[in-house]
Structures are given as C-alpha cells and as structure tokens.
Amino acid sequence: MTDLSAANARFGLSGRIRFKEIPGGLVVMEVSNIHGNAAIAMQGGHVMSWHPKSQVEPVVWLSRFAKFAPGKSIRGGVPVCWPWFGPHPADPALPAHGFARTVPWEVTATRELENGASEIALALTETGQARAMWPHRVGVSLRVTVGATLEIALITQNRDDHDLVIGEALHTYFQIGDIGDIRIRGLEGCEYLDKAGGGSARRRQDGPVVLSAETDRIYLNTEAECVIEDARLQRRIRVAKSGSRSTVVWNPWTAKADKMGDFGPDGWRRMVCVESANAAENLVTLVPGAEHRLWVRYAAEALP
C-alpha cells in the first residue's frame, strides 16, 4: 500500500490516524489520541515508537540514528522476528530473525475504541521473496492497540497440510534513563542460555537482572511478567505476555553498538530489549488449521 491518499481515505481517522512518507521512502502510520502517540512503519509492521501522555519520556525507544530504507531493519521500536529467531537453523545465509521485519505489511482495519484507544490490524503481505524463504501456506497478522497501555498480538495461522515449527519474538527496545540504573524483575530463578557467553552456556538467574556488560540471554520456560525498574527516570515498565515461553534480554554494550553504526554515541545506554519470544527450546509447533497468538501489554508507572 503505497498510495497515501488512498490509505488515508480508507484507514485514516481524522486527527487520530494518518499515513505519511518519511525520508528513505518508507510509509508510516502516525497515531495520536487522548492517551498518547505512536508510529508504525508499513515495512515490517514495525511499531517504531510509543509515548503515552502519562510519561515525560517515550516508553518504546527509537534510535536517533536509525536508518530508514526498503529492506533494512529499523534500529529501535518493536521489530517482529518471525518465522525464526536468531540465525536460520539450517541456512545461515538467510536473514537473522526471519524476514517479517523487512518486508511489506498492509493495514486491514482501523478503529477507535470506546476508551479512546486506537486499534490497528495489519497482515503480512505475501511476496515471492518471502515464499522463497518460507514455502508454507500461513496467515500472519498483527493487532496493535495504542492507548494508556500498548498491546500487540502477533497471530500465526497454519493454512498448510503439515505441521509447522516457528520461532518468534517481539524484539522491543524500551527507553531507559541509563543502563547502569535499571533492574529487571520477574526472571529470578529462571534458566537462561548466555549467547554473549558463548551460546551453549546454561545458567540460572540469581536475583533481578542487572546489566554491566554485553548481554544476550534467552530465558527459558517462563511466562512471567517482567518489570523494568528505572531509578534514573523514576518509573517502572511492566511487560505482561501470553503465548510466549521465552524472554530475551539484550543490550549490545559499547563495542558492538559502535560496530552496528545506527546507535549513535552512547545510544546503547538509553535502551534495553526485553523480548517476549518463543525461541531455542520453546519453539511453537502448529498442526494444520491451528492458530498461535503471542500477546504483550506494556505499561509504565511511577516508582513509589
């Protein structure tokens, strides 16, 4: 969907939802309502930002140095990792974290809810490129609700005649005051794979998660809500989920962030990824006709 006038005529809501083209040629939906603001790129169905009016700072972080270009992932926001997480299990030449975050999605519906929140439905557009990487019949959709909280549901339907195994994640970047001033609660006692420590290392979380170096962990067999306590911004961010058995905690730290080129100076200090996922041992098997829904809700509140 590249015709902006047609998109605004069909799915725009006066004063609340509008489509625009940004530098780099990407089409973005801007959402503004009584609760706050958000932006969603049609490439990747990518929620780029969310800033509720209750907060001085945005809750979802977007790098000031993010690069916007067709076929390139956006640094920040909520990238959709699907239908695999991390490297492809059989072909490392295929894109990491799948292809859903860099291909077109289309809006299928928009509406204003009674409480003033905005609900947007999107569907993954089937392309020859995607079929070459994933030769299965599926339906993939997103439902995004922008309000006092941000809710996202990633829905996969198996329309094929055989079982499908998928890995997935909502790879959310949260804005924080400083990486040295946060604690992540909710993962105490969980086993995790330490990807930054060699990948095969298996450890158990002792107490809240505190980051002091490059961190890339897949916490296994956990459906718990996570809470990011931020002493610098004096707030906590709650990450509730369902349909997810893994939680990924990631921060590249300084050396890796510098190599990536789109964090900017010290951008890594202002973000942490707490990702609701199904990865590693927690992949999802869908029998023919089955549907799987990965749902998250993000909320921010002041520290007591």
Image: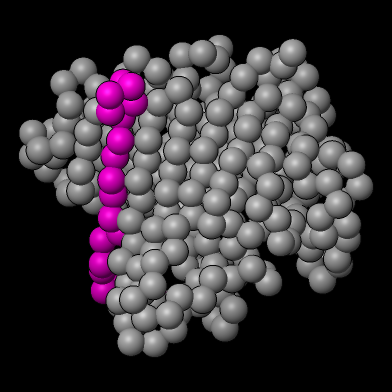
Q: Viewer-proximal residue, 175 or 112?
A: 112
Report the residue at 28% width, 45% height from top: 121
Apparent side of residue 124 relative to residue 50 in the rendered image (left or right): left
Query: Can you see residue 167?
Result: yes
Provide residue 79's location: percent of width, then percent of height: 48, 49
Apparent side of residue 291 relative to residue 225 in the rendered image (left or right): left
Using the rendered view, name the quadrant where residue 88 is placed.
bottom right
Q: In the image as oriented, which residue stretches furthest toward the right?
A: 206
User: What is the image's colouring?
Assistant: one colour
Query: Can you see residue 258?
Result: no
Report the residue at 59% width, 78% height from top: 89
Q: Viewer-proximal residue, 23 or 7?
A: 7
Using the rendered view, name the quadrant where residue 133 is placed.
bottom left
State the extent of the magenta-drawn residues as a range.
113-133
Using the rendered view, name the quadrant where residue 262 is placed.
top right
Q: In the image as oriented, which residue stretches furthest toward the bottom?
A: 162
Report the residue at 34% width, 76% height from top: 289
Provide residue 65's location: percent of width, then percent of height: 52, 34
Assess whether residue 63 is covered by the magenta stretch: no
Does residue 302 sit above or below 136 in this rendering? above
Provide residue 181's location: percent of width, then percent of height: 80, 25
Q: Viewer-proximal residue, 288 or 195?
A: 288
Assess whether residue 117 is covered by the magenta stretch: yes
Apparent side of residue 37 relative to residue 204 in the rendered image (left or right): left
Report the residue at 83% width, 46% height from top: 188
